């Protein structure tokens, strides 16, 4: 038995035929994303419809490894279960748009196995290649294949659907890691979404940003969504983003009719596209170079053909705000173009040095994986500062001083228990004692020797006291202890601090960072500078920055592995902060720098200045005498709650709201792009027919187009006058009051007989920005004329 790819095989192309296909171009009918589902042991048939091949060979490949299965009518693979069916006769096949049998190439896989499941690629050998992708699902005998909801003849309309394999995309683990509410985990599986989660979506709306991000899985599904004509307003899910619904009317738009196509694109992308690069790091090398490094993506690693590094300039700081000794930035450097820069990197490299940057400038860097099918989403963004002029990053880290031979001291003093020597005579492991209480009890007889050797002849009591160790624990720090009892067990919680005091006493940790200061303090960020410590500066590997607000109860937040200068971001405006730094080397964390307190600047909310001649929707509503009770609706930021409440009261004035909202502009193209159905596009032009209730689900789509169009589209011409003579009409008008970006005018005109039905308007386009137009037409006397 052969299961035919009913939806996938071909689609109706309205009014098209083989003769209408340009001979120089070839293309394939887009297959259904759902593909074919067959039971294990049955035969599978994947059909590929190629128009305009003109004798060029068609290849079938496995998508995951690009292995060629067939070339033309010849089987290439050694697997004798595979064959290709192709009719070279000139007899027409049934179905519109298919004139010759040679258009269809079918891949047959006999007695399919579970390992046969996946994507297959039909490829025409052109430059560039023309490809289509076909999904095969193999269902075990214990499962029942889903009913095909779109079964038609083999040349039926090709509507993307989701097959049983598509439903297998389950991202629950990601949702759990993102702390999605347990009752909302039903949205973390494509199958559950389509079958119904049983959960009110509004209840789970706070979790949707995390759910949608997990669903997209770091892949860029936007190209597929564009191909499937998902409106741009509905493509946020294709990017792994979610726009929450609020009371603002612009957030109430409908994308429900595109959900299946969107999910189908996501499922296909999960199998085909690479995930983003991992572990992206950016290190400043000098004033004009940044080193970007990363790890390969986790998913579809072998398919990556290149990486793209994107570098965006965010802020360039003034020289006079830097330390005076570093103020040698030339003014003309800041005049360089700050457009985003992209760099392509081959797949065998996982690093790139960005050159020719501005000194002491903040850049944002992302890295994206690409393969032949598309790309991942960009990696998480990293922000980094280039160094100030004349400074170079130190890449050589010296070895830290060696630790004292505590183990040899213990053995020489007679400690003969290996576990005690290993646990209590290694200063780098003393913090582990808290997890090994039993070992501490076993080693109690040697306590005097082990803690004496750890002290190494020094009294660490002052350091231990400064770190809050209780008095009963201080003998451990001095090494003057003879026996351990249960009173000392409470010291176990302080073992991290105890270890740090030992290492400081040994002189193996770096000193405190010096000259801590800030520049460029803004409302939400500040640039932190510091100098290396006086002690063991050459052993420092990195620094840890601690910061907190001075509000009661606020805890320190730690930023690890930072270097000077560092941009401390995401701060609150008009807030007091405290910061300090610690240097870290191979042995541990050194002394803390002095605390520094600063206040961010106040956030001044400036009212947007109205641009001269900008469209004022409120003024329009006042001019047409909209009822006062309806004025809350005369705004592009109206509230949905107001619309529901005022709709019965404002029904008679609704035409005024639409007219003012449209602003004399035709927004139909925008509405079509954003998924507004044709029956509602008259509203987009400000026309009110009285039956707009069916358009309410698209109110957000329409209002967004209204607001966008008032800034892009010119307003209507004003003061149109016509001077008519026997055979011509002279038109005169004033330029639009709103939108001075008019570049040309189109004159619409129509001949009207007394008893005639309306004709389609004729148009004459003026290619110049003129406000007069003269055209000649013969108008028989007694008939009349009209010009618009």
Image (cartoon, helix red, strand yellow):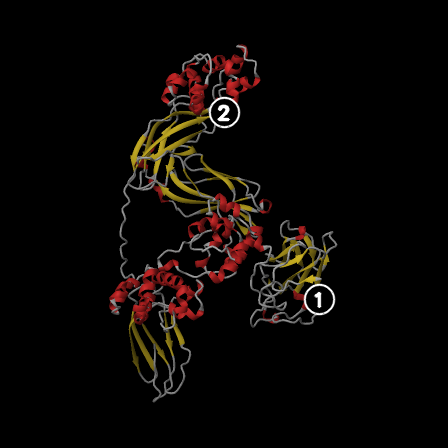
* Quarter of the figure with the N terminus: bottom right
Kindly indicate the quadrant of the structure image that contains residue 663. Answer: bottom left
- Residue occupying image coordinates x 54% and y 19%: 422
**How many other residues sit within 10 Å of disc 1, few (<14), some (14-19) or many (≥20)?**
few
169, 565: nearer the viewer = 169
Q: Are marks 1 and 2 in contact (CB under 8 Å)?
A: no
Question: Where is residue 226 drawn, in percent x and y?
Answer: 50, 59
408, 183: nearer the viewer = 183
Question: Where is residue 476 drawn, in percent x and y?
Answer: 43, 16
195, 484: nearer the viewer = 484
Q: Which residue is mark 1?
A: 88
Left or right side of 781 for 451: right
Going by the picture, which residue comes out furthest to the bottom? 782
Q: Which mark is residue 432?
A: 2
Going by the picture, which residue comes out furthest to the top? 413
Give the mark nearest the N terminus, 1 or 2.
1
- Residue occupying image coordinates x 63% and y 67%: 154
Question: Where is residue 537 drawn, in percent x and y?
Answer: 42, 24
Q: Nearer the viewer, mark 1 or mark 2?
A: 2
Q: How many marks?
A: 2
* Quarter of the figure with the C terminus: bottom left
**How many other residues sit within 10 Å of disc 2, few (<14), some (14-19) or many (≥20)?**
some
Q: What kind of element bears circle 2?
A: helix
Asked whether residue 715 is in view, the answer is: no
Q: Which mark is residue 203?
A: none
């Amino acid at each position: 038995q052969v299961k035919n790819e009913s939806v996938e095989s071909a689609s109706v192309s309205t009014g098209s035929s083989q003769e209408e296909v340009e001979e120089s171009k070839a293309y394939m009918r887009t297959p259904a994303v759902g593909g074919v589902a067959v039971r294990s042991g049955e035969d599978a048939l994947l059909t590929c419809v190629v128009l305009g091949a003109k004798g060029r060979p068609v290849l079938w490949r496995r998508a995951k490894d690009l292995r060629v299965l067939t070339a033309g009518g010849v089987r290439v693979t050694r697997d004798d279960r595979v064959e290709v069916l192709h009719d070279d006769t000139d007899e027409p096949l049934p179905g519109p748009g298919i004139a010759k049998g040679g258009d269809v190439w079918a891949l047959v896989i006999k007695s399919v196995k579970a390992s046969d499941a996946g994507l297959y690629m039909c490829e025409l050998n052109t430059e560039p290649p023309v490809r289509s992708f076909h999904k095969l699902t193999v269902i075990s005998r214990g499962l029942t294949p889903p009913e095909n909801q779109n079964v038609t003849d083999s040349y039926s309309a090709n509507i993307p659907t989701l097959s049983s394999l598509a439903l297998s995309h389950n991202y629950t683990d990601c949702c759990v890691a993102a702390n999605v509410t347990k009752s909302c985990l039903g949205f973390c599986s494509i199958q559950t979404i389509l079958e119904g989660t049983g959960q009110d979506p509004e209840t789970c709306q706070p979790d949707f940003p995390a759910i949608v991000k997990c669903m997209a899985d770091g892949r860029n599904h936007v190209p597929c969504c564009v191909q499937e004509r998902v409106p741009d307003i509905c493509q946020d899910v294709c990017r792994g983003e979610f726009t929450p619904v609020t009371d603002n009317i612009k957030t109430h738009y409908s994308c429900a009719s595109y959900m299946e196509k969107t999910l189908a694109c996501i499922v296909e992308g999960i199998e085909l596209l690479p995930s983003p690069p991992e572990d992206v790091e950016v290190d400043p090398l000098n004033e004009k170079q940044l080193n970007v490094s990363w790890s390969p993506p986790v998913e579809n690693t072998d398919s990556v053909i290149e990486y793209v590094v994107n570098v965006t300039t965010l802020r360039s700081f003034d020289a006079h705000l830097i330390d005076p000794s570093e103020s040698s930035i030339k003014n003309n450097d800041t005049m360089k173009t700050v457009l985003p820069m992209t760099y392509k990197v081959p797949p065998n490299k996982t690093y790139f040095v960005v050159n020719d940057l501005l000194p002491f400038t903040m850049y944002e860097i992302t890295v994206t994986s690409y393969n032949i099918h598309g790309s991942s989403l960009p990696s998480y963004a990293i922000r980094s500062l280039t160094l100030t002029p004349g400074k170079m990053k130190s890449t050589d880290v010296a070895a830290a001083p060696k630790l004292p031979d505590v183990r040899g001291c213990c053995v020489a003093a007679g400690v003969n228990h290996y576990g005690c020597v290993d646990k209590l005579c290694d200063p780098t492991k003393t913090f582990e004692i808290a997890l090994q209480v039993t070992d501490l009890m076993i080693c109690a007889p040697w306590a005097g020797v082990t803690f004496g050797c750890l002290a190494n002849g020094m009294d660490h009591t002052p350091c231990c006291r400064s770190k809050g160790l209780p008095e009963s624990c201080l003998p451990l720090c001095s090494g003057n202890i003879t026996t351990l009892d249960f009173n000392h067990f409470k010291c176990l919680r302080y073992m991290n601090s105890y270890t740090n005091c030992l290492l400081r006493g040994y002189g193996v940790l770096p000193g405190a960072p010096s000259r801590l200061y800030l520049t460029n303090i803004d409302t939400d960020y500040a640039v932190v500078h510091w100098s290396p410590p006086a002690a063991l500066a050459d052993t420092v590997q990195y620094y840890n920055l601690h910061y907190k607000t001075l509000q009661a109860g606020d805890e320190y937040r730690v930023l690890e592995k930072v270097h000077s200068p560092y941009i401390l971001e995401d701060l609150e405006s008009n807030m007091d902060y405290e910061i300090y730094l610690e240097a870290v080397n191979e042995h541990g964390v050194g002394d803390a720098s002095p605390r520094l307190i600063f206040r961010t600047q106040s956030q001044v909310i400036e009212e947007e200045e109205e641009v001269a001649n900008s469209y004022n929707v409120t003024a329009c509503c006042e001019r047409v005498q909209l009822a006062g009770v309806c004025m809350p609706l005369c705004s592009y930021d109206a509230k949905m709650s107001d619309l529901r409440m005022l709709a019965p009261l404002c029904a008679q004035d609704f035409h005024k709201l639409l007219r003012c909202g449209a602003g004399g502009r035709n927004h139909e193209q925008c509405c079509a792009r954003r998924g507004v159905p044709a029956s509602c596009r008259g509203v987009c032009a400000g026309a009110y027919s009285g039956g707009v209730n069916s358009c309410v689900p698209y109110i957000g789509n329409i209002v967004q187009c209204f607001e966008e169009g008032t800034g892009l589209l010119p307003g209507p011409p004003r003061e149109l006058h016509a001077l008519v003579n026997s055979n011509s009409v002279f038109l005169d008008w004033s330029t639009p009051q709103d939108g001075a970006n008019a570049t040309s005018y189109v004159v619409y005109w129509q001949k009207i007989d007394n008893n005639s039905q309306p004709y389609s308007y004729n148009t004459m386009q003026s290619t110049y920005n003129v406000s007069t137009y003269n055209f000649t037409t013969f108008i028989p006397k007694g008939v009349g004329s009209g010009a618009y």
